Amino acid sequence: MKKLLSVFLFAVIAMSVFTGCSDNPSGDDSLRARVGDFAIVVDEFKEALLPMDNDGYIYSNAVQTVCEYTDGKATQQEAVDAVVQAYSELEKAESEIEEKTLDEETENILKEYGIYPEEFEVFINFRTQDLSTYIENLSYLYYYLQNDVKYNSEFNTNNLIFVSKIDRLIQENNRDYYYYANINYWFVDRTDEEVEYLLQELDKDLKWCSVSEDEYVWENSAEIVEEKSMEYIYIYEDYLSLFAEYLGLSEEESEEMDDMLDRLENIEKDREDNDKQSAIQL
């Protein structure tokens, strides 16, 4: 796997406020001028990251609606509509993707900032992998939603509950991973002013990912960034193992199924508690 990335959200920047309305009340142009060609790197990075962020946003909302249905907070039709709509949007996005290549000028600028163009090109073309996973997972959710209505059995309902909840946990974990492995990683050795500009630019447009200092701590050590990224990979692998174990159960193994659902609920609770503790520490 390629190196990993991480992010740390900055605070507020100087504002230039004029009388009346202003198209740029936060002084973005001044900061952009000060960071020089680094702004071009950020533009390239945003062009790659924002579509991935939007994909994650669409998928997460669909999964959340299904979870709300299993919790009695949404109707079955609302859950189906959310899954179908997300599937349609992401499938369309996948069909329109074209492989991207960097021009020589951009490659030279990336090199100036310690970014290997070949590695960065892999990153900007990685969106197809996430889209493929999202689309496949949505097809499974749709299948379980249909079975929940068609068969109206505890077995099928439990399947839907488990699959939707573990999908949500995986996506929440992926969001954390994105911060460190897909953002912080590329800019771990940048100046404070450059990081300020980067996070300010991202914070304006991100919908699923976050660069909030209330959630994450920006790391200036490549080693720490990699360690944190790997932690999320290990958690992801644990979720996949749990999922595979659950799918191996038959309808007759109801006790084992109930036990797996309890384990999943405990994982959810532990994650919520950890998030609260992290917020206190920040």
Image (cartoon, grey):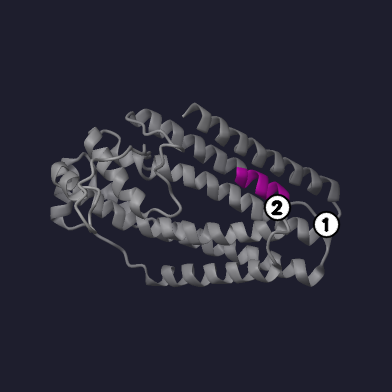
Q: Is residue 141 left or right of residue 101?
A: right
Q: Amino acid at mark 1?
A: Glu
**SS of the residue at dot 1?**
loop
Q: Which mark is residue 251?
A: 1
Q: Which mark is residue 162?
A: 2
Q: Which residues are magenta?
A: 239-246
* Position of the N terminus by quadrant: top left
Q: Does residue 235 show up magenta in the picture? A: no
Q: Is residue 50 visible?
A: yes
Quarter assignment of residue 226: top left
Residue at figure coordinates x 45%, y 33% from the top left: 228
Along the viewing direction, whichever of 45 and 70 lies nearer the viewer:
70
Estimate the x, y position of residue 50 in percent, counting from the top left. Answer: 36, 56
Residue at figure coordinates x 14%, y 42% from the top left: 34
Estimate the x, y position of residue 171 in percent, counting from the top left. Answer: 54, 50
What secondary structure do most residues of the magenta stretch adopt? helix
Q: Is residue 137 left or right of residue 227?
A: right
Q: Is residue 269 left or right of residue 39?
A: right
Estimate the x, y position of residue 250 in percent, counting from the top left. Answer: 80, 55
Tags 1 and 2 touching, CB below 8 Å: no
**SS of the residue at dot 2?**
helix
Vertical placement of residue 22 versus 119, above or below: below
First of labels 1, 2 by sequence position: 2
Quarter assignment of residue 138: bottom right
Vertical placement of residue 76 versus 12, above or below: below
Residue at figure coordinates x 70%, y 44% from the top left: 264
